[in-house]
Amino acid sequence: MELYVVLKVIWAVLLGVLLSGLAVMVGMDMGVGSLLRFVGRNDVERRVALNIIGPHWDGNQVWFILGGGAIFAAFPTLYATSFSVFYVVMILLLFSMIMRPVAFEYRSKVDAGKWRGTWDWAFLISGAVPMIVYGAAFGNVMQGVGYHYGWDGQYYQDESFIWYLLNPFALMCGVMSLALSIQQGGTMLMLRGEQPIYGRARKAAIGGGLVGGILFLAGGLWLGHLTGFAYTSAVDPNAAATPLTGPSVAPVVGAWMHNYASYPLLWVLPALGLVGMFGAALLNLAGKPVLAWWLGAIGWIGAIFTTGASMFPFLMPSTTNPSQSLTVWNASGSEYNLGWMLFFALVFTPIIICYTSWCFYVMRGKVKASAVAHDEHSY
């Protein structure tokens, strides 16, 4: 196998790693935001919840930047096309996420109930909407998106964003994503919160894990009847990185199950997802949030890599012209680019993981309501 092909495969795996890091770390913060008005029944309790994630939420955004940066550098054609296809969705995502840092900084500036209540709703919206959009994006690309390229490489969109945003399968994936973020956020509140926040977060975390696991299982059953995409001619993984010329592709019902039939070992991935989701719910029920947090992370990893394994090598199929679908083979950067990107990823990703782990270690321990209530510098 040529080096260029190996690099493409490595970056497909690394993209899954970065998207998993985004889901686990950013999703945890989003889950706390979505739960803020439910786990906190008064202003002090809500301030406690905010201060639990306060030292980490902005650092966790690094995973968001890494995920977008990896797509931009390793799969530039995918980046350009997806950000055009999902333009309205991206604007919705950005505006909802812009609300979060503003809410963090301004909520406690004025000691007034209506003022703080308004920002609490901003936390809920800016926590729930991005996670729904995140999950729906996976559901959208699995069904294919209406776009094609002209002879000059110009992109053309052939489908209204309302359909690919609101179709049933995508909405199910969005709700599942929100449920898993609530599981992860609720577990974090259990780790660093005390009663009564602990008890309310425990119920939310258990419910999130169960709902996420049930929807993941339902999605797997649905996948067998979903129209996927498959090559109908020989594939050259080392071909030119352009969607204008390439092998024939056709929509095929159940195509996303073909890789599992060819490589049975891949069934380990959905098994990990189910064990992580349901296992985290059981551990939270047993009052063991540390282990539950790690199993919840495994649940996210299993779900994202299951999607990747099902679609490989497709990244964003085209329903208008399936043969112009974007894949790992035709949407990647150059060999030189992927090589240097891999070098920097191997250097800086472990640094980010070590620094993040150190931050969580330093900020360990319970956040007490008595300390927050009398600290004007806390959130």
Image (cartoon, helix red, strand yellow):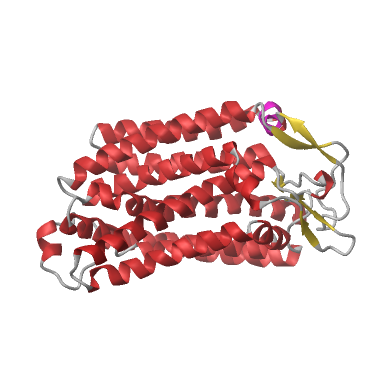
What residue span does the magenta drawing correspond to?
256-261
Is 275 left, or right, of 289 in this rendering? right
Is 81 left, or right, of 346 in this rendering? right
Instruction: Identify the image quadrant of residue 231.
Output: top right
In percent of the image, x 53 and y 28: which residue is there? 218
Is residue 215 something one can see in this rendering? Answer: yes
Does 259 appear in magenta?
A: yes
Does 322 appear in magenta?
A: no
Q: Eyeballing the image, is 46 above or below 291? A: below
Q: Eyeballing the image, is 149 above or below 213? A: below
Instruction: Identify the image quadrant of residue 97.
Output: bottom left
In percent of the image, x 48 and y 60: which residue is there? 63
Instruction: Identify the image quadrant of residue 304.
Output: top right
In percent of the image, x 38 and y 68: which residue is there? 101
Q: Eyeballing the image, is 296 above or below 252? A: below
In percent of the image, x 26 and y 39: which residue is there? 202
In this rendered view, identify the residue nearer to me: 185 or 24: 185
Residue 188 position within the rendered picture, expressed as x and y whole percent measured from the top left = 30, 49
In this rendered view, identify the residue nearer to me: 338 or 343: 338
Residue furthest to the front: 114
Residue 347 position within the rendered picture, expressed as x and y whole percent measured from the top left = 53, 65
Residue 300 position within the rendered picture, expressed as x and y whole percent measured from the top left = 47, 43
